[in-house]
Amino acid sequence: MLKDVFVTEEEIAAQFAIAAQIKATIGSGKTAFISTFGCQQNEADSERLMGLCALMGYGKATELESADLIIFNTCAIREHAELKVLSKAGALRKLKEQNRGLITAVCGCMAEQSHRRDKFLNSYPYIDFIFGTDRLHLLPQMVANVLAGKKQQVYVSGLPHDKFGVIAEGLPVVRESGYKAWVSIMYGCNNFCTYCVVPHVRGRERSRRSADVLAEIEALVKAGYKDITLLGQNVNSYKGEYSFPELLARAADFDGEYWLRFMTSHPKDASRELVDVMAANPRIAPHFHLPMQSGDNRILRLMNRRYTREQYMEKAAYIKEKVEGIALSSDIICGYPTETEEEFDRTVDAVDKVGFDMLFTFVYSPRPGTPAAEMEQVDHKVKTDRFARLSALENKRAEELNARFLGKKLRVLSDGGVGGIFKGRTGHNKIISFTLPDGAEDSVAEAGKFVTVEVTNTAAYTLDGVMVKD
Ligand code: SF4
């Protein structure tokens, strides 16, 4: 099954050859700007797009206005995200008038929705091409076509008919950071939660080969990367040669100090084996994102989440018991269609009982084409009231939970500092500000270095501390 989804080496080589021709044609000094909206998967995709841009001879533009190639990598998860893209895409018209040679493109999840594609084609004629989430390896071909005078090209996979999508291995990557990296281990989703467009815009689950994933991680560790996040819509259903817990255990076995993280875990598939692997491997960061979405069983059924409140709470308890001090985070949707006050109260109660270090709380936003969009909607004011209530509770719980770090010495990956104040992240994914010991040079805590910090103050979402000797 695995081999069916892979783009052939010949196809990739053909794109590289086109990229080399473009590089010879456009000469030096051209730059590309990729504007990324939405999730980490889009950020990872943008880094691969930038890798292809580099292959075509485009440097990285520092600002949109000066770029010769602009790509909007879009998100369709909420209406708000889509409206933001549409408004920013409008500004491209002026830039195109000022620079006739400017090439503009839209890709990502919005490009996979026919009503959004039509909108781009009809209302934004200055967009040269539109391409879907699994067509990004064709970027050189698309740019070559524009240079040859073709306008308004559309490259999508034909979802949902061509519903499996593809995997393109071996693409170059230009990473945003020199010490934090995304590694996609799989693409797409099979779960069809009733509120979500992802299976419709990213196709069905398909997993990269375990050997390719592990080779990428090993190369990153050797290159000095310290914080590596494995990505998938539901990493627990990864189906390479290894299961996800086995893959994670092997990924945590290279020489060097580094953290591994993963996103996202569907609670129905988060296994005890995975938790046990985390507990046994200090290189796996003690942070678990487990989206609960609702604490009420009727709403969970309506969402097609396929776990109950009780099952969720049992898994959360096992994680907390096995991995000491672990930070648990979650997502909650407020005001799901038909949700009553009592049902929302049960969500509030579950959030209070589990105790999350971080909660991503969302007001429900109907997505065209999903079953939930056709259900009876909750009044907007009710949704925002619920959102405010839950946020207030979470602020209180996060503050209480963060107090457990007071006086503790934590390993911190520094993001660097200015004026003697440094910032970094802990393995628990906490933001921490810290100062250096007297007389220490700034270089001891430069960005990308691990340091030990004693926590001197805690707030709901931040920690403060002083760096100490290891
Ligand atoms: S698991 Fe559910 S919420 Fe997550 S991407 Fe798949 S359908 Fe969407």
Image (cartoon, rainbow, N blue to C red):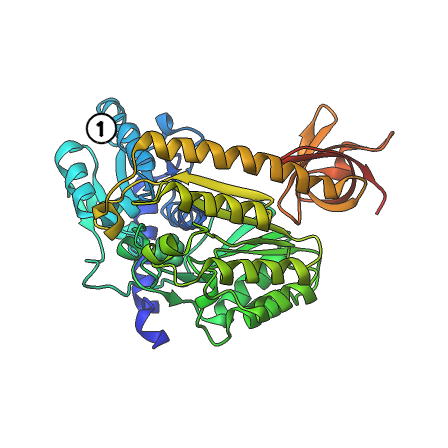
Label 1 Cα neighbours within 10 Å, binned few <14 / some 14-19 / many ≥20: few
Relative image position of residue 22 (x, y in whole percent): 30, 47
Image side of residue 30 versus residue 266, left or right: left
Image height check: is 293 above or below 106? below
Q: Quadrant of residue 166?
A: bottom left
> What residue occupies the far left of the structure in this picture?
122
The residue at the point 38 percent across, 45 percent down is 53
Give the residue type at disc 1. Arg
Using the image as rendered, state which of residue 422 and residue 343 is in the foreground. Answer: 343
Image side of residue 53 versus residue 372, left or right: right
Residue 38 in view: no
Relative image position of residue 114 (x, y in whole percent): 17, 47
Which residue is identified by label 1?
100
Image side of residue 281 versus residue 235, left or right: right
The residue at the point 71 percent across, 44 percent down is 412
Using the image as rendered, state which of residue 457 and residue 27 is in the foreground. Answer: 457
The residue at the point 28 percent across, 32 percent down is 83
